Amino acid sequence: MPFDMNIERYHNLVIGSGEAGKYLAWSLAKLGQSTAVVERALVGGSCPNIACLPSKNVIYSAKAVSLVAPATGLGVVSGSFEVDMAGVARRKREMVEALIAMHLANFKASGAELIMGEASFTAPKTVQVKLNGGSSRTIHGDRAFLCVGSRASIPVVPGLAESEPMTHVEALNLERLPEHLIIIGGGYVGLEFAQAMLRLGSRVTIIQHGPRLLDREDADVSKALLELMTEDGVDVLLDAAVLGVEGRSGSSVALLVKSGATETIVEGSDILIAAGRLPNVENLSLGRAGVDLNARGYISVNEKLQTTAQQVWAMGDCAGSPQFTHAGYDDFRVVLSDLTGGNRTTHNRLIPYCLFTDPELARVGIDLPPGSEPLNKLELGLSQRQPRSLAEA
């Protein structure tokens, strides 16, 4: 490209500091390569800020409540107690702050430059960054790496967006206990929050569009999770479609729900959306970079995570990889292998994961796209749940 004094040049341009992006940036910078990392808001990505680790923090607090609740029959005798949601949120927030400090230290030690702002391509491997402080910078990389993640998808339902529902981000910051939490979606996020919020003291209803929970798992696993939820006290509506919403989440909401030929009103205090995710690609101007999207709206990549543009790779959620932190880390290893002459790919890799209900569900199998039936699975945990009484033993 023509030389321009206003363009800052780096060997590596990484957009997004999530799991794959940060490890790649740290690794390349430690090799002495000039590396710029552009991050819009969450230093270290979703996992330490708004997803994996914060959610497990809250789930552990809910577990602690369940262990001392008289109904468990564990023989714990205590006086009266109450859940301090502000304390739950404070404990989670302190953990996140410590993780951010750790990430900032890692960036400094590696030599990678962390730039806080939003990037948009103006030409191949060249972005304009609107800095969070208000000014802008233009940056070009000899190589570019996209690691911009994903966000919760809000279904198109009359009145739903206007009700200002929570996603997992807002739910993890709650300093109050919802009286009746209505969760739209019966997948991994929905089930983890359902059990945790129930244990903390909320009434919980799950509205699932399909005929079973966890519809990508085998039918017996879905059945076991349904039994787990209903035994704990979660109301579950299957084959249910939300036709409209009135009210405001956090105060009072009414959802018109159709199940089969029956329409009913489900009233509650709060709505949590857990109905899938969308890649964060709409503001990148990828067309100017020569980067194509696939039919699902994710960045199109091959098995080495190379995009349709020369010397541009995509990793993690935005590339359609399984939406787990360890999958993002493996994406980093695939790209680093490609850069260093290796032959690592995503082809037929095994992706283990765990659903953090109590008990947990663990699975390992071939990485398949959404809609495909998982293969070679190993389910653990649900069969190990402790009986509630001697009659169940």
Image (spheres, helix red, strand yellow):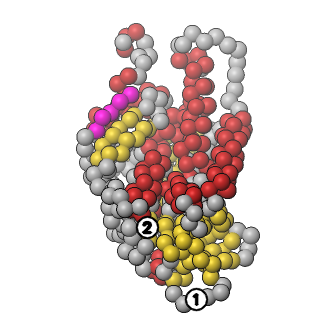
Q: Secondary structure at mark 1?
A: loop
Residue 151 seen in the current view: no
Residue that numbered label 2 is attached to? 313
Q: Is residue 334 above or below residue 202?
A: below
The magenta segment: 377-381
Residue 249, magenta (yes or no): no
Position of the C terminus, as image quadrant, is: top left
Q: x%, y% of residue 184?
A: 47, 49
The kind of residue tagged 2 is Trp
Residue 374 seen in the current view: yes
In this view, the residue in front, 210 or 52, is 52
The kind of residue tagged 1 is Phe
Which of label 1 and label 2 is nearer to you? 1
Residue 379, magenta (yes or no): yes
The residue at 33%/65% (across/down) is 302
- Circle number at residue 3: 1
